[in-house]
Amino acid sequence: MRVRRAAVASLMALALLLGACGGDDGGSGAVGSGELEGTEITFSVSLAEEEQAAVQDLLDEFEADTGATVNLTSVSSADLPQKLRVEVGAGDPTIHLFAQDNLALKVLVDENLVEDLTEVELPDGIIESMIPEQFNDQTFFLPFRPNVRIAYANRERLESADAERPTTHTEFREVAEAVAEEAGTAKVTLSLAEGDPAAVTISEWIVSFGGNPLLLNDEGSVAAFEFLQGMWRDNLLARESLLAKFDTEVDYLQGETSWLAQNWPVTSAQLSEQGLLERFIVYEGWEGPERAAHVIGGDVLGIPRGVTEDEKEAALALADFLISEDAQKTLVESNAWPSVRDDAYSDVPEDQQETFEAIQAALEDGWYRPNVSYWSNVSEQMNAAVRRIIVDGEPAQATLNQLNAAIASAAEAAGAEYPPAEEDGDDNGGGAAGISPSPGTTPEESPTG
């Protein structure tokens, strides 16, 4: 887990003054030994318990390498804007580098809460599609950790049901029928727990059916809800789906409540620790009638406006360290995190090779949720649709018309263009859903943010 140090420490200060955050060595070694002695900063990142050790080890390495002191804290994505409003307004930020949910960026820029990082250079090896979007042609955020859900299928149980892993929505239903017949009860879960879990799942289904989650009542959205409504009605989805999210889905897979589920890749690390990963086929999942669609979530790095020059220097050095090849390899290997780099997968543990092949395949069909000011209302209406349409059986079109009206009102109140303008092309799913491909987030239900 060693991170390479700079051969010439004196170049560090110049690099930072120029805003450079990386170099030919892959983004590591921007700081020489002891160059930040006496500087203390706080890094905020939301982590699952199982992810903390690897991150802390990296911070210890950074401290030993640079002389800086790094305090680790966790301010939730929802709470960060208000904290920065108070502290930036007072001219005294207590956080100096943060990892923030990539669906929650616009408010930080609109309210002038973050430093302009336009002059920061990213190191070689960063995957282009992982570079955070700009706002008004300015860069405020740096890449850190993408995330995407993948599928876990119980190998032995599917074989007993004479079923294979589903790769289309029709096969998904067929497999659900087969395993329900074999088990005598539904053995497929969808993450439909209240809040972001349901919103992530529903977004993927809508986009895969050619719909636009911001509209919610278009043809694709209606078709997606009718499809899921039919599966629920026919008892093909386990009732535990209503409680299913990043942690409970792992429990359901371990205890065989679920024989087929989607979840974040940290699942593989947890199953591997228990010697259970080999029981599962791990793959990218299934596609709808229009396309495969996988919400790309994750965290990006930012620096609050108003930090001192010394603090900014240390924060940029830490950001550089965290996106270096060696640090990203550590996070891949230890935490099963997807990487923002294309050179971070060379040393993946053998038992997780399948996981990272699935991650890369899912990212190819990734869809970034739009940074719109009214997304919380979109999520709220999706959750209402789960209750009313899927569970209670209300007619999809009429119900979605009502819920869409609430979204339209929220957009109007926020002064946003509505209906959203359609974009040409289909890169990252933007065109397919009529939404510009601007980064979304690791949902708050996930262990990343």
Image: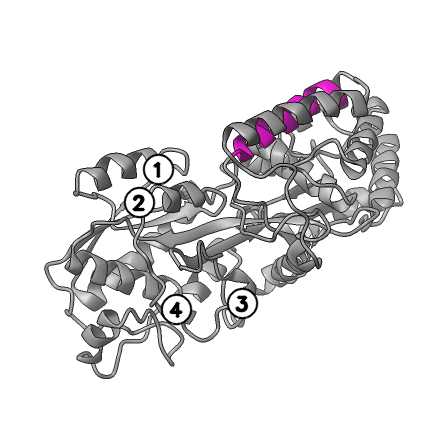
**Dot 3, how many residues are within 10 Å of its Cα: few (below 14), some (14-19), or many (20+)?**
few
The secondary structure type at the circle numbered 2 is: loop
- Give the Cα distance between marks 1 and 2: 8 Å
Residue 67, quarter of picture: bottom left
Work out which residue is located at the far bottom of the displayed protein and give it. 7
Q: Which residue is label 1 attached to?
A: 81
- Pinpoint residue 162: horizontal percent, then vertical percent: 89, 45
Pick the residue in front: 282 or 280: 282
Query: Which badge, 4 or 1, comes first in the chain's sequence?
Result: 1
Q: Which residue is label 2 attached to?
A: 113
Which residue lies at the image location 54% right of the left edge and 47% below the top edge?
Answer: 440
The answer to the question of whether label 4 and label 1 lie on touching residues, with beta carbons closer than 8 A, is no
Residue 3, quarter of picture: bottom left
- Give the Cα distance between marks 3 and 1: 27 Å
Along the horizontal axis of the image, is 279 left or right of 309?
right
Query: Which badge, 4 or 2, comes first in the chain's sequence?
Result: 2
Residue segment shown in magenta:
374-389
Which mark is nearer the camera, 3 or 4? 3
